[in-house]
Image (cartoon, rainbow, N blue to C red):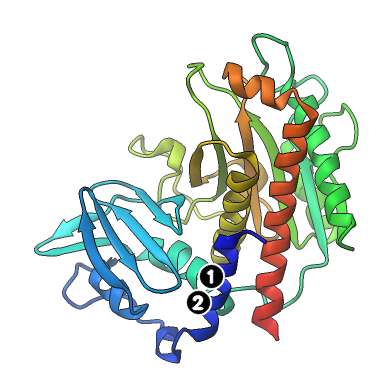
Amino acid sequence: MHSITRKLFFYQIVLFSGCASTRTVDAKTPTGTVGLSYISRLYSMKMSAFGKKIVLENKYNKLEVETNSRRAWINGVMIWLHEPCRKYGNEWTIREVDFKKAIDPILRSYAYAPKRLPRLVVIDPGHGGSDPGASGSKSNIREKEVVLDISYRVRKLLEAKNIKVRMTRTGDTLPGLDARTAYAAKVGADVFISIHADGAGSPQAHGVETFITSAAGYDSSNFYGQGGDKEAQRNNAYDAANAILGFSLQSNLVNMSKREDRGLRRARFSVIKKAPCPSALVECGFLTNPDEESLLNSASYRESVARGIANGVLGYFTLIKRAIR
C-alpha cells in the first residue's frame, strides 16, 4: 500500500472523537465557507504560511492550500478545489463543499466510507471501435488500444487478490457512453473506473490525473470560469466516496507511474456522472507528449500504470474494511 494511504490510516485511528462533528462553518467566515484556522483546530494541526501556501500539519498528515488558487495538496498529492481559497478579513477560507466532499472524506474516510464491503469492480476501457481516441504523433499508437491493454492488466492484478472484475468491452468495440454505465448498473458494480490516455493541443502537456464527478451547483474543473453545467447528477449520491476512491487512485498512480501529478479533478464526463456507484476516470499520460507517447507504447509502463490503478482500488477496499469493522 502507498505510504500516503498508510499515513491516513494511522491518523484516522487516533483522531479524537470531537472531530466527528458535522458543524464545519466558522461563525467568523461567510456562509458556505470554512476558515483554514477552523480546519487547523479540528485536526489539531499547526498552521503556517510559506509563500503562496497555507500549510496545516500534524504528526500524521499535511494539508497545503495555495492562496487565491484552486490547488491544494494532501500529503503531497494534488487535489483541485471547486473554487479558489480566498481571504475574508484576516481569515483564509475555502468553500464548505470542498471541505465536506473532498478534504474531510479523504482525511476521515472511516466516517464517509460505504457501509458495505465492495464485491465487484467494473473497468471501462475508453473509446474503441470507430473511435480511436487520442493518437501518438511518432508511433501512431491509439488510445483505444493502450487503455484496453492497461485494463486487462488491472483486471489480472485485482483478480489475483480475489476481487471480481467485469469490463465494459474486451475487444475493439464501441459501447455507447450510456451503455457503459448501464452495464455497471446491470451487473451491480460497487466501483466503476474508466481508463483513458490524454491528448492535448500542446505537446508540452504531460502527467497523470484522475477525475471524479463535480459537486452539484459547481463548475467542472475543465469548465471553471466558463459557465459550465452545474446540474446535480446521479453520481452525486457518492460524492464523498468518490473523493476517497479518486484520491487513492491518484496517489497510487503518481507513485507507480513516476509522472507529473496533475491532481484529483472534478468533471461531468458522462461515464462518471451517470455511474451507479463510486466512480473515477483515470488519465494515464498524454499520447500527444513525445516522452509519454513512448512510455505508453511500452509494456513496462503500462504495467506500472496498471499496478497504480489496482493499488488504488485495493487501498480503497482496505479503507472500507477498516471503516466497517
- Pick the front one: 303 or 130: 303
Q: Which mark is residue 125?
A: none
Picture coordinates of residue 296, whole percent (x, y): 70, 26
Image position of 28 with respect to 151: above or below: below
The residue indicated by pointer 1 is 8
Cβ atoms under marks 1 and 2 closer than 8 Å: yes
Which quadrant holds the C terminus? bottom right
- Image point 44% across, 42% down: which residue? 221
Report the side of 213 relative to 325 (left or right): left
Quadrant in the rendering for residue 241: bottom right
- Image point 36% across, 38% down: which residue? 227
Query: Does any portion of residue 122 appear in the rendered image?
Result: yes
Q: Which residue lies furthest to the left in this view?
A: 89
Quadrant in the rendering for residue 207: top right
Report the side of 296 relative to 97 (left or right): right
Which quadrant holds the N terminus? bottom right
Tell me the kind of residue under disc 2: Tyr
- Assign a secondary structure to mark 1: helix
The residue indicated by pointer 2 is 11
